[in-house]
Amino acid sequence: MAGRGKRKSKSAAQQAESGALKKARQPVEEAAVPPELRQELEERLYRLPLPEDFYHFWVFCEKLHPESPCDALKDTLGLQLVGPFDVLAGKHKSAKNPNFHIHWRHFYDPPEFQTILVGSGETQYHMGYYRDSPDALPVFIGANEAKKGCSIAQTGDNLFAAVMLFLSRRQKEKAGREQAAALHSLGGALRSAAEMLGFSLEQRTKAMKDRDRKVVSKTFHGAGIVVPVDKNGVGYRELPETDGETRGARGTSE
């Protein structure tokens, strides 16, 4: 009986990547953001829990652009920090009776989506935290271009991963020497910060893949919902109509 061949040993690059992933799974330390500001943001204004990567990314942008952290990515990537970041910047203090639940909400955004970054005005590109439950932390960061449709793309489980993915795509486009250097510098800073803090830079983490298996309906936007039927019989059940029939009915009602 023939024996199995020896398993090939991992290359140095594979071992380094494996080590980086293990490091990314370690608990993340709290960012240097005052507890009273966290409380105002999460308990009084938005009434939604925010993950630690949100606060760490704010600190990261403060170091890049101390005068205006919300504009730290504007020149290089065309991205602006918005939504709950506006509260950290103190912009909400000058607003009259703002509704934080629709703050920076775009046309196709479902209730599960909370905008945190905006990009091109032409396509209405924006990124946001996606939650399966309002009292739980986000399950991933999604991206949508409202001018093109309702589709939500998964871009990692933290802001460092989402922005790094956006930057990587920008690097593949034609850019001048100065712009290419700026992208390279920002990419290095993002990667260094993510590794130091223990954030994964994967587009789809294991936790995200595990969550996909629990999705009970893909929904038109593609991000899916996780609403299992509980012991009382309450939860999501499949519709008898197909997606095509549902779209047709929606179009007729409009």
Image: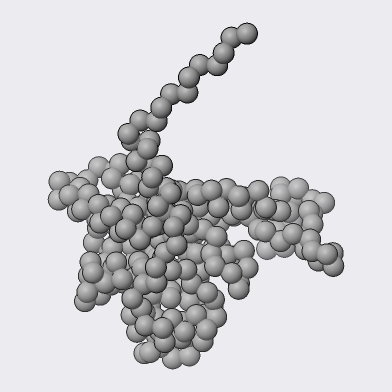
The quarter in which the C terminus is drawn is bottom right
Residue 71 at x, y percent in the picture: 28, 69
Does residue 183 appear anywhere in the picture?
Answer: no
Looking at the image, which residue is at 82% across and 51% down? 240
Residue 218 at x, y percent in the picture: 66, 51
Between residue 215 and residue 172, name the one nearer to us.
215
Residue 203 at x, y percent in the picture: 45, 48
Between residue 14 and residue 131, name the one nearer to us.
14
Q: Which of the 4 quarters of the picture holds residue 60? A: bottom left
Looking at the image, which residue is at 53% across and 55% down? 152
Q: Which of the 4 quarters of the picture holds residue 161? A: bottom left
**Type of colouring:** one colour
Between residue 94 and residue 247, name the one nearer to us.
94
Looking at the image, which residue is at 46% across and 54% down? 25
Residue 175 vertical placement versus 83 (above, below): above
Residue 73 vertical placement versus 93 (above, below): above
